[in-house]
Amino acid sequence: MKHSGKAVLAALRLIGLAGAAVIALLVGALLAKVIGTFLLQHYLIWTLVGLWVLFTVFTFYFFRDPNPMVPAGPDLVIAPGHGKVDVIDTTTETEFMGGECQRISIFLSVIDVHVQCAPVMGRVAFFQHTPGQYLSAMKTDSAQFNENVLIGLDAAEPRGEKIGVRLIAGLIARRIVPWIAQNDTVQRGERISLIQFGSRVEVYLPRRAKIKVKLGDKVIGGETVIAAFD
């Protein structure tokens, strides 16, 4: 599938950087011992190696990227991210949706999958990165202040509808990695981005969309139907 494996490459980069830092610390400690100090002890070596191994295991777990079982059927909107639905309301989004719309907000904890998928098939008609703060993504109003990327999709099914997806960085998640650009065409369930370490994803829907989830539901990115156009 398109963009498959990119999350693993991101994990390998972080693991490599952490490994290089461990090696640098060990070399520094060794040099310190050579000049007469006692900084290098067996426990220091095994502690650093152990921490690196734990970091490696956690990073591979965090950057896991299962292939979604994308549901078939007409006029469906699927969850872009894994997590818990903690906001369903009506809001105003003027940059792409052009006014009042429905919003479904999904909180992604550090143990959730952090690869996001396209909620519908369509064209990327709007793409905007907004710098900001890094407040905890557990706060439902973090989208107003945090760094985020707003992706606007002109849906091919149902044709002519607008669907917005906002990727929001959090307290720990300080990097949003989009894999799409403006005017790209995406398929429903296609991987579109990665947010590293805890975050939030919001979906903006037209008023006529019928929401199929409720507060507290756990959703699976690329699989769970969150709305439909009847």
Image (spheres, grey):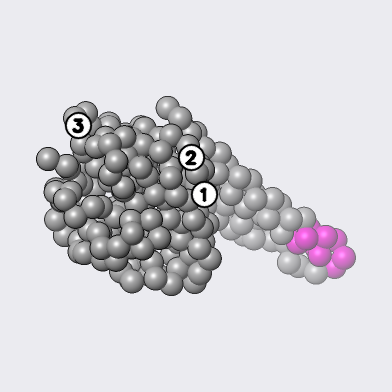
* Percent of width and height locating residue 55: 52, 52
Q: Are marks 3 and 1 in contact (CB under 8 Å)?
A: no
Element at badge 3?
loop
Which quadrant does the C terminus fall into?
A: top left
Q: Residue at x 73, y 66 (%)?
A: 39
Element at badge 2?
loop
- Is label 3 or label 2 in front? 2
Type of the residue with mark 3 = Pro
Q: Is residue 35 above or below residue 3?
A: below
* Percent of width and height locating residue 202: 32, 57
Q: Which residue is mark 1?
A: 177
Q: Residue at x 44, y 49 (%)?
A: 126
Which quadrant does the N terminus fall into?
A: top left
Q: Residue at x 68, y 55 (%)?
A: 21
Would you call the spot at circle 3 few (<14 residues within 10 Å), some (14-19), or many (20 or more)?
few
Q: Nearer the viewer, residue 57 or 120?
A: 120
Q: Which residue is mark 2?
A: 183
* Residue 213 visible in the snapshot: yes
Tell me how many marks there are.
3
Q: Which residue is mark 3?
A: 74
**Label of residue 58 in the image:** none
Q: Are marks 3 and 2 in contact (CB under 8 Å)?
A: no
Element at badge 1?
strand
Which of disc 1 and disc 3 is earlier in sequence?
Answer: 3
User: Is residue 11 inside the magenta stretch?
Assistant: no
The residue range painted magenta reads 28-36
- Is label 3 or label 1 in front? 3
Q: Is residue 178 above or below residue 86?
A: above
Prevalent SS, magenta region: helix
